[in-house]
Amino acid sequence: MTHPANQAFTDGPTLHDGVNMPWLGLGVYKTQEGEEVIQSVKSAVAAGYRSIDTAAIYRNEEGVGKAIRECGVSREELFITTKVWNEDQGYESTLKAFETSRKKLGLEIIDLYLIHWPGKDKYKETWKALIHLKKEGFVRSIGVSNFQIHHLRDIIEDSGVVPTVNQVELHPLNTQKELLQYARENNIVLEAWSPLMQGHLDQPVIARIAEKYGKTAAQVILRWDLQNGIIVIPKSVKEHRIRENAGIFDFELSAEDMAAIDALNENKRFGPNPDEFLF
C-alpha cells in the first residue's frame, strides 16, 4: 500500500499557466528500461515523490508508464514530464514524436512537455507544435530544456508564448545566475538537471555546511536549489538514496550559507554546452 504523499512532496510553484508542479521529482536519465526504471519509479512514489521526469531519448518511457499504472497512486496525483529529442524537431515531426511518447507512457495527457535541446535551427517550429498540443489539451504545460537567454528571447518574440519551465544543468559549480535572473523577470521556473553534479559532491564548503545542519552534502545542495526557487529532479536507482534526497523540507539554510554555496560557481558544465550541441 502506497502512503499518500505529505504536503512537502506535492508542494511546488504554480507555473504561469496555472499548473502546479512539485519542487522535487525523480529523474530517470540513464536508468535502464525494464525492471530498473520500474523499481526506481515505484520506490520514489512509495517514498512520497509525485513528479517523474523522463524523455524520448532515455528510451525508458514504457517502463515509466508501467510503473505509473502499478504504483498504487492515481494518475491525477502524479506529474509526468517527457521531452522531444533533437532528431524529431520541426512541427510535424514533433507532433509524431509526442504521439509516440504518449503511447509508450500509456497516458492520455502529459503534464509537462519540453523541447530537450535548442539544437540547430528548428526550435521555433518545434515550439509552435508544443503550443498546438497545449491548445488541443494533450499537454497541461509546455516548456524547454537547455535554452540559453538568446534561445528564450527567440521563441518568445516569434510566438508570443513564454515557456513555463526551462530545465537546465544547474548546480553549485554552475549557478546560472544570469539565466535565473532572466527567468524570474519573465515568470519562467528553472528546473535543475544534474543538481548533484553527477556525484562530484566532495566540496569542503558543502561538507562544512552539511555537518552544521546534520544533513548530507546532497541534501544541502537540493535545499539550496529549493531556496533559490529552482525545481530539482535528482536521479537515483537506489531506494535509500531516493528517500535521502527527499529529506530537504525540514531545514532551512541561512543567507550566509546560501552565499557560501553561490560563491563556488566556476561556470563548470558536466554536460554539453547548449550553444555547441547542434544537430
Image: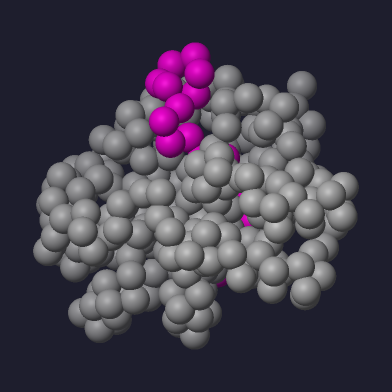
Q: Is residue 87 left or right of residue 253?
A: left
Observer able to see residue 25: no
Query: 121 above or below 76?
Result: below
Would you say 228 lies left or right of 272 here? Answer: right
The relative height of residue 128 versus residue 28 in the rendered view (above or below) is below
The number of discs equals 0
Left or right: 279 as drawn, with respect to 175: left
Q: Residue 115 in the image: x percent, y percent?
A: 30, 55
Does residue 93 belong to the magenta stretch? no
Quadrant location of the N terminus in the rendered image: top right
Which quadrant of the figure has residue 155? bottom left
Spot the residue most to the top: 35
User: Picture coordinates of residue 132 (x, y %)?
Assistant: 26, 62
Q: Position of residue 29 (x, y in %)?
A: 43, 36
State the residue at coordinates (63%, 25%).
Answer: 238
Q: Where is residue 260 drawn, in percent x and y?
A: 69, 69
In this view, the residue in front, 167 or 210, is 210
Give the colouring mode of the picture.
one colour
Whether 27 is among the magenta residues is yes
> Which residue shows up at 30% across the image and 58% down it?
273
Quadrant hosting residue 123: bottom left
Q: Is residue 41 left or right of residue 83?
A: right
Magenta stretch prevailing secondary structure: loop
Residue furthest out toward the front = 204
Q: Is residue 87 visible from the viewing direction of this image?
A: yes
Residue at horizontal 35 percent and vertical 34 percent from the top: 58
**What's drawn in magenta, residue-wise?**
18-37
Residue at figure coordinates x 79%, y 54% from the top left:
208
